[in-house]
Image (spheres, rainbow, N blue to C red):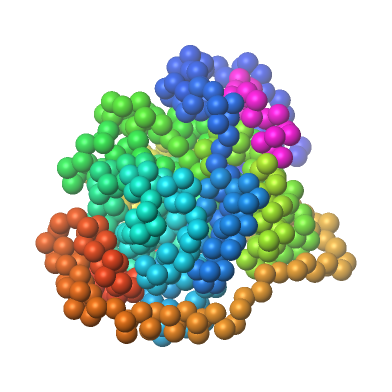
């Protein structure tokens, strides 16, 4: 007899599901209505009939001018929100003229060194009417300060700024690697942003707790839910421990999930995560405001599923993943370009990715009703199973800090989370190698001759121009004002006061990202990864 098929999380799938699959299931308490606790069916009562999801396209390349042109192209084609990719030096706090930045400037995102770069990046874009998401973590405080300063200089009402700064440093230690400081100091920077923004930019999402990168590293759907919510619990506890009221900041928390190919498992994953977070916030943390119970999330289609072989197949993959995101109730969505296994997306690939979302929104009929798969025996059974398996992980993580509140930190420090992800990634690769998991165009249905597609080309002179800009800035700024501002950052780092006002003052004085990061390095030190096998 053939072995029963399984989801990507290893959950066995029965041939058919019926009422017996949901024995003991109480729809009134476990589903409820859309817009009501526990939000399994979505956080809004009318969902997409009231407002479509925000269609974002993650973009950033080269220097600020080149990225600005791409943003205006996307806005002209119907994008409703911007999503900024920063280059590697910016992400880890080095200026473009640092020897450590050589060869990396503008390669995987836009190079931002100073307030002048940030102003060029958003030139001609009304920041108080456009929602902007910034994928930045270790230097999130600096880039947020640059964004706010650029908006203020452009005459925007800062109180009306909306968007998200990723600011999720824990997943960097787990899966991604763009950390700078030891964990304790990095957590302080995250909570400083949460506390400052709650007052100064109240419409801003102060952290995007990200399972996306853990999924890209190879974790399963169940692990993505468990580890993402465990990270979220850690940030909530850290904010409470510095004196913040949970209902003062929790409504501005947001999440960032991956969307993979197993369509129905992905739908169930999103529903399970919403229900779990609602109970965590209400029952564990005692939040009273219903908005604090809501899990609001952005989704990006899975970069790790893109194939360089037969890249046009990626259009189908992205469509399935986008459909799963919409059926799962996402608030915001980015669809990858079909050519991103080869290079940064061309304008054509970016347009197709955006049109994919627009066709789903306006032609598919899927947004016409809320949570259309609710009540499916399989969907509800799978939602329950993902929740139960994720809860088992949360229980294990809690054991790493018995009687304490920071089990996830201990689990990361001891390599538990990393090992679980590595094991899952290895098992999946073995399945591909053995032919038990089919990747169309790779280990099955390969083409005798691959068709080449045009790819985005980088301007080789860009790095030299960016280096010259940052050096010219240093020569013309007021050296005394700049030095005083950096001393202010150092003083705040040492005395424990909120760093955001001092960082804002520093970027206003034309201090660079690398200079501010270096001041913090001198006070906090740098994190050194211990190898986990």
Q: Residue furthest left?
A: 495
420 lies above or below 275: below
- The answer to whether 465 appears left or right of 238 in the picture is right
Q: Nearer the viewer, residue 141 or 316?
A: 141
Q: Over which residues does the magenta segment extend?
A: 359-380
Which image quarter is the N terminus in? top right
Q: Residue at position x 82%, y 61% from top?
A: 446
Q: How far from the left and from the top, in percent, is residue 451?
A: 83, 67
Which picture quadrant has residue 22? top right
Q: How far from the left and from the top, in percent, is residue 497?
A: 15, 57
73 part of magenta stretch? no
45 lies above or below 4: above
- The answer to whether 268 appears left or right of 232 in the picture is right
Q: Is residue 179 visible?
A: yes
Q: How far from the left and from the top, in percent, is residue 530?
A: 36, 68
- The answer to whether 193 appears left or right of 492 in the picture is right
């Amino acid at each position: 007899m053939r072995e029963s098929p399984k989801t990507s999380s290893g959950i066995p799938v029965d041939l058919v599901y019926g009422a017996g699959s949901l024995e003991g299931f109480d729809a009134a308490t476990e589903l409820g209505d859309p817009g009501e606790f526990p939000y399994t069916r979505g956080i809004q009562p009318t969902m997409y009939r009231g407002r479509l999801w925000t269609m974002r396209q993650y973009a950033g390349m080269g220097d600020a001018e080149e990225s600005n042109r791409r943003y205006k192209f996307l806005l002209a084609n119907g994008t409703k929100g911007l999503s900024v990719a920063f280059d590697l030096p910016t992400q880890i706090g080095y200026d473009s003229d640092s020897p450590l930045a050589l060869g990396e400037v503008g390669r995987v995102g836009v190079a931002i060194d100073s307030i002048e770069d940030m102003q060029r990046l958003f030139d001609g874009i009304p920041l108080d009417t456009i929602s902007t998401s910034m994928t930045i973590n270790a230097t999130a405080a600096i880039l947020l300060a640059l964004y706010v300063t650029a908006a203020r200089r452009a005459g925007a009402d800062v109180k009306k700024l909306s968007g998200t700064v990723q600011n999720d440093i824990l997943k960097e230690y787990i899966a991604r690697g763009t950390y700078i400081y030891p964990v304790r100091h990095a957590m302080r920077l995250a909570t400083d942003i949460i506390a400052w923004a709650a007052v100064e930019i109240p419409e801003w999402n102060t952290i995007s707790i990200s399972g996306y990168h853990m999924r890209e590293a190879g974790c399963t759907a169940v692990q993505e839910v468990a580890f993402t919510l465990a990270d979220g619990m850690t940030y909530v506890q850290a904010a409470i421990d510095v004196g913040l009221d949970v209902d003062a900041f929790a409504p501005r928390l947001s999440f960032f999930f991956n969307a993979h190919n197993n369509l129905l498992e992905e739908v169930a994953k999103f529903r399970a995560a919403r229900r779990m977070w609602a109970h965590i916030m209400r029952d564990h943390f005692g939040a009273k405001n219903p908005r604090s119970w809501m899990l609001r999330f952005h989704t990006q289609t899975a970069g790790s599923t893109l194939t360089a072989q037969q890249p046009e197949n990626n259009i189908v993959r992205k469509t399935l993943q986008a459909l799963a995101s919409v059926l799962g109730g996402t608030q915001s969505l980015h669809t990858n370009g079909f050519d991103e296994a080869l290079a940064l997306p061309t304008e054509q690939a970016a347009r197709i990715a955006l049109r994919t979302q627009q066709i789903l929104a306006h032609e598919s009929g899927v947004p016409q009703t809320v949570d259309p798969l609710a009540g499916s025996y399989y969907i509800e059974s799978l939602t329950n199973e993902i929740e139960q398996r994720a809860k088992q992980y949360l229980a294990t993580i809690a054991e790493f800090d018995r009687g304490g509140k920071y089990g996830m930190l201990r689990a990361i420090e001891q390599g538990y989370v990393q090992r679980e992800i590595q094991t899952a990634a290895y098992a999946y690769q073995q399945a591909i190698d053995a032919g038990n998991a089919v990747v169309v165009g790779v280990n099955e249905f390969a083409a005798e001759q691959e068709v080449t597609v045009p790819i985005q080309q980088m301007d080789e002179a860009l790095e030299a121009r960016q280096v010259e800009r940052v050096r010219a800035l240093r020569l013309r700024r007021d050296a005394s004002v700049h030095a005083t501002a950096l001393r202010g950052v150092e003083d705040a780092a040492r005395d424990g006061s909120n760093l955001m006002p001092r960082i804002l003052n520093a970027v206003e004085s034309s201090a660079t990202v690398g200079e501010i990061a270096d001041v913090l390095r001198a006070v906090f030190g740098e994190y050194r990864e211990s190898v986990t096998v």
